[in-house]
Image (cartoon, rainbow, N blue to C red):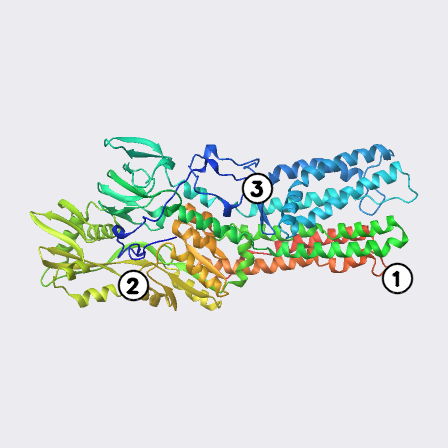
Amino acid sequence: MASNKDNMKMDHDMSGMDHSKMDHSKMKMDHDMSQMDHSQMDMGNMGHSNMEMDHGDMDHGDMDMSGDMMMHGGQMMHMGNLKQKFWVSVVLAIPVLLLAPIMGLNVSILNFNAPMFEGIAILLFDTALYFYGGSPFLKGAWAEVKSKEPAMMTLVTLGISVSYFYSIYAFIANNLLATATHVMDFSFELATLILIMLLGHWIEMNAVMGAGDAVEKMAALLPKTAHLVTDNGETQDVQVSDLQVGQSFQVRAGESIPADGTITNGQSTVNEALVTGESAAVNKNPGDKVIGGATNNNGTLTVQITGTGESGYLSQVMKMVSEAQKSKSKAEGLADLVAKYLFYAALSIGIIAFFAWLPQGFSVGVTRMVTVFVIACPHALGLAVPLVIARSTAIGAQNGLLVRNRQAIEASQHVSHVLLDKTGTLTEGKFTINAVVPTGDGDEKSLLSNLAALESNSTHPLAQAILSAAEAKGITVKAAENSQNIPGVGISGEINGQTYTIVNGNYLTKNGISFDNATADQWAAKGNSVSFLLQGKQVLGMVAEGDTIKSGAKALINGLKKRGITPVMLTGDNQKAAEHVAKLLGLDEFHAGLLPNDKQKIVSEYQAKGNHVIMVGDGVNDAPSLAEANIGVAIGAGTDVAIDSADVILVKSEPSDILHFLDLAKITNRKMVQNLWWGAGYNIIAIPLAAGILAFAGLILDPAVGAVVMAMSTVIVAINAMGLTADKIKND
């Protein structure tokens, strides 16, 4: 995104934020969502140039948006309504489980001595199960094959497809061809495999919160219509998508600003928290820039448009989030990796077994190959990870952690750096008075009273801190008269007929007004914003205000270092203020003077050096970096957009909870690896035996034995998952 760094310096401590100098003229946006096609769910290719925000007209293709999305093999897959699909499949499976021979045995639970009738009934229910209950896996396998990344879906599809089609062959051979040798039926295996895999995915979907659509949340920040100012000075309501650069619109109190622009008339305060992540209500005057998506608090503003469509600030953020999410979605999970190798192993060994046994008859070769394919898809593999994730997310929720992306748990073991946005993460984002310093014989109470009188009508955090300090000292504040904001300087007004002005140090220097520079520098070096009270050209005193470091911030930094992870602070503060906070927290690395869109670049730079990064933030401007990072962590008190872009949410907004997440992820990973060994490890022995590698010694794995082993591994997987307990999370 092109930007003017000289005109867009954002001080995240608010001590030096001057929005009048923010240049958004090169940031354009159009949010017509009427043309958005979600049928492929490809966030990276989602066009934002036509996003009008009429969600009623959004085209979702044939998707049931009430259904569940699942990530497998780097593919976002629409799984349908898993709960409904599972219970319907249970009903369809009951007749099969009662009538079909148990795998490898010519014995069933119910036997009506009517083979043809039973066979037809089983076949009909098999077909319904395969195409209905198995549809998520069939669709998922197709997506994996198209992307040339076979994984869990492909392995499951191999198992259920071989079971289904071989069972059709068994029915024909046993009932119509009347072959001398009974052909083994896999209907029982088909039913149990589909049920357990659906159950596993349903458990996982319930455990891991569905990913919200961060891009739609961003688009929702913009209103649908705007009050366009016509040539004759009247206003006309038009669609936001119809706005053009150079036109002017009016935005009234309480309304969202529809596009980036420059104020030509009116004064107000603007809440940019949803866009910048900062809690400030920023004073706006003619000549100041405004950002589309921000909220006008009071007063009426006339704004000339400088950016619409894809060049808008918010649209650029949306584009970065989409691209980062698309990149992250290609990551491969541990279970998918195991499934991929199992698929290739089963396919290769099965084909080899077929040709090896072919000399003894075609049916013998096919039976060996089919047995290998079916055994390769163990039931326990479908529950190995979901059961652990379900247990882990429940424990996390009890400890103020919401894990929205399973891959975050797996990626945590490789983390080398944690990048922390300062305001709202390491600091409270609320200002307090640290010093009131009168000049000469002046008294502190009188100085604070005059400062409060001038700031009495302001909602800016710095002003609110002064008013709170005055109230705490029992000072009755009478609002100054004829108050006026001075862009880039401060505020002026009349108190008891005398004119007073609150200004910054730059104003004093430029106008040659002497002041206690040493004391001002001393407080500024401690990370404070220093303002001065003037009467005429006489400095009556100064006030130093600073943000408050969160109580758990120091523990977080120490905990990360203890774990061999490097903490890094990101801030829009000036270098001195950033150095002060870094020193207090014991940080060795920090980046100061950052523009809102610089964070994603810094995340990418760390990753380019081979580092695995956690990014922690809370605002819309943090959304691209949260999505770009290997793991994005959102502060629970942050914006919806930041939360929707994150993999993990800190519900209590406690920085030290990041340590709890790392500890929880560590033990969760250990349990997942153990379960994957129990769920799939036996294949190392079972597949070669099923292929008949030890047939010369008279040892061939009977399918019935294989079924017993798989059942045992499923039980072991469930018991092992329950061994994950909350008391294993460290509290250091």
Q: Which image quadrant is residue 259 in? A: top left
Residue extending furthest toward the left: 497
Front one among 511 and 678: 511
Residue 516: give x, y in percent of width and height.
Answer: 15, 65
- Counting residues from the N terminus, which is met first, the one under dot 1 or under dot 2? 2
| Relative image position of residue 16 (x, y in whole percent) | 26, 57
Amino acid type assigned to the residue bearing label 2 in the image: Ala
Above or below, 516 against 423 in this view is: below
Question: Where is mark 2, residue-wise?
Answer: 577
The residue under label 3 is: 68
On the image, the x and y values in percent for residue 713 come to 71, 54
Please report contact status of discs 3 and 2: CB closer than 8 Å, yes or no.
Answer: no
Q: Which residue is mark 1?
A: 696
Q: Quadrant of residue 345?
A: bottom right
Q: CA distance from mark 3 to mark 2?
A: 46 Å
Q: Quadrant of residue 726?
A: bottom right
How crowded pointer 1 is (Cα within 10 Å; few <14, some 14-19, many 20+) is rated as few
Q: Viewed as shown, does residue 313 lie left or right of 506? A: right
Q: Secondary structure at mark 3?
A: strand
Identify the amino acid type marked 1: Phe
Q: Position of residue 529 (x, y in %)?
A: 24, 59
C-alpha distance separating marks 1 and 2? 78 Å
Q: Is residue 105 above or below residue 226?
A: below
Q: Amino acid at mark 3?
A: Asp
| Mark sitting earlier along the chain (3/2) | 3
Mark with earlier residue (3, 1): 3
